[in-house]
Image (cartoon, grey):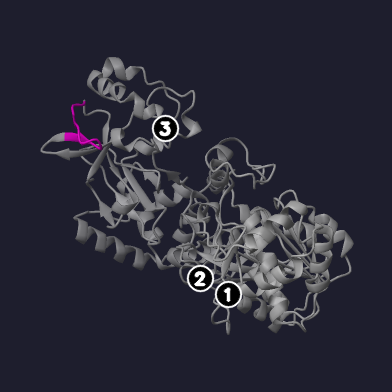
Amino acid sequence: MNKVFKANITYQVSDFLNDNLKKITSFEKANQKMHDAFGIIYFFDNDEELVMLKEVLSIANNVVEEPDRSEYGDFQTNSDLANKVTLYLAEKKISPEVIIEPTCGKGNFIIASLHNFKNIKKVFGVEIYKPYVWETKFSIVDFFLSNPNSNKPKISIVHCNVFDFDFKAIAKKHSTNSILVIGNPPWVTNSKLGSLNSTNLPKKTNFKNHSGLDAMTGKGNFDIAEFITLTMIETFQNMKGNLLLLVKNSVIKNIVFDQNKNRYKISAIEKHCIDSKKEFNVSVEAALFYCKLNSQPTSDCLEFDFYNRQKSQLKFGWLNDKFVSNIDTYIHSKEIDGECPFVWRQGLKHDCSTVMELDKVNGHYVNGLNEEVKLEDDLVYGILKSSDLKNTVINQTRKFTIVTQKKVGQETKYIKTEYPKTYHYLTRHQVNFDARKSSIYNNKPLFSIFGIGDYSFKPFKVAISGLYKTFHFTLILPQNNKPVMLDDTCYLIGFDKIEFAVYALILLNSNTTVQFLQSVTFTDAKRTFTKDVLMRIDLLELAKQIDKTDLQTELETLNEKYKFSLTLGLWDSFINEMTPVSNRQIAMFT
């Protein structure tokens, strides 16, 4: 195996090109030769490429180190996996006439398609990285040299940005043909490619039309593969055929979620989980996304293990107006899927941990720069992170934080006069605050924080980590008569009465809640729990369902273990607190 134009080329292909092109001086004639032999249209773009290729082929043992393109989300599908994927499609009696690969890379899916589909008339491959364009062409030549009796369709391998290529022209020209869109788009976000100054970006980056804070804080950032997949679906949804793309799990979840709104003409949606470590040597949750085109829209998805497809593992998607991760188990807890009567909040966010987060050593505060810090205590609060939420009840913290505001946007000039030590410390580290990258801090008061409000100062809180998959809620008690804060990886509801907090804790840690959350959360999500998910827990409905005997038993267990002396005396008040005001008013007149 040699390298030509930074692309792998077999000795068989090298010898063929040497023998058949050495006397040809015109790229048009060379292209005709390659088209007649292998069906490849426009093998060369110009005479210069023909001359360069002949010169490079004349140099023996031309070896170039393989570039690492992983930062571009470029994880090339190995030939074995590509072959298994196309065989799976063939087993489903899929026999396309037109193959479309929007980011064909080194061409392994195209080669596998040529090997396993017998009725192909046309192949379109698009690739922005020129060495891969060459390698795909060389691989096609090698395939037909090794399989001279195979069907030779017309093949176009185009060096082009996928976002500039006119796929609609293909849809129009081949409207009566059966198509297969197949491939492995880049596993990377638009912001990552932008930071690499890549030109392989869609013209409109906020393609889901997020606005305001959502666009500023990350929802406007999206996966390039998701954009490509949706573009393919939108372009070819009215054609007879199928689509199969290898993407991250999050992309599949997003597509199925948005299908309730988009109503693309796709059905029989499947997700086939693969072992990314084995196939690509990366720790990314990825799968094959399959759907049938030009069909009655559906908005659920069967999930399989690609290596053992005998039976689906689960079905996720939309059930009526609810999006769930496991439709079969969801039906047993669906009664509590509604709206939480208490508003779940995210913990505080400061993006300046070396300055704002403190340890206490021998009675002194020490920051992340290992500096001993002298502060007034009034603005210092205990803080918990996701990793701290391991126990059912917590009444002390290992870390502390400076809380500069009581609500978002509050002026912070008061710190200078009321808390001079704290002000001196913060201003001494102003450069750390100025280095915060998020645009949410722009034009805000000095030392601003987010995720802060009246709820932050409630003495009793029930919280859960957004990052861990524990399905376990924790009761947070005050520390030194001050409320404890949580960071922005946690979600919380706050209470003035410990009884209300404990009642909520028992309900949230019940089997019904656990089963419900397991049915609506995705284990491979970056955050297992989000505000949207937690707000679906109808605590009022759950409170109505719970057996009072079980409730009393759980309360007694907590009393004994944590030295509480709580009763169910405020249970009716708790129910009343959760009941909508309109319902309370109706009750007064009945």
Residue 87 in view in this figure: yes
Residue 419 location (% of width, % of height): 25, 20
Few, some or many residues within 10 Å of mark 2 (<14, 14–19, 20+): some
Residue visible at 26% across and 20% down in the picture: 424
Q: Is residue 278 left or right of residue 391?
A: right
| Percent coordinates x, y for residue 263 in the rendering | 74, 59
Q: Describe residue 188's horizontal placement relative to residue 258 as left or right.
A: left
- Which residue is denoted by mark 1 in the rendering? 81
State the separation of the CA atoms marked 2 and 3: 37 Å
Q: Which residues are magenta?
A: 365-375
User: Residue 427's spot in the image, x, y percent?
Assistant: 31, 21
Whole-percent x, y for residue 484 in the image: 29, 41
Instruction: Work out whether mark 1 precedes mark 3 in sequence or the reverse, and give the earlier one.
Output: 1
Q: Answer whether residue 299 is visible to the viewer in this image.
A: no
Q: Are marks 1 and 2 in contact (CB under 8 Å)?
A: yes
Q: Amino acid at mark 1?
A: Leu
Label located before the other in sequence (1 or 2): 1
Q: Is residue 539 left or right of residue 75?
A: left
User: How far apart in space, not on screen, are marks 1 and 3 (Cα)?
Assistant: 43 Å
Ranked by sequence position, the earlier of labels 2 and 3 is 2
Disc number at residue 279?
2
Q: Nearer the viewer, residue 554 or 200?
A: 200
**Residue at label 3?**
436
Q: On the image, which quarter does residue 183 sit in?
A: bottom right
- What crowding class fits label 3: few (fewer than 14 Cα within 10 Å), some (14-19), or many (20 or more)? some
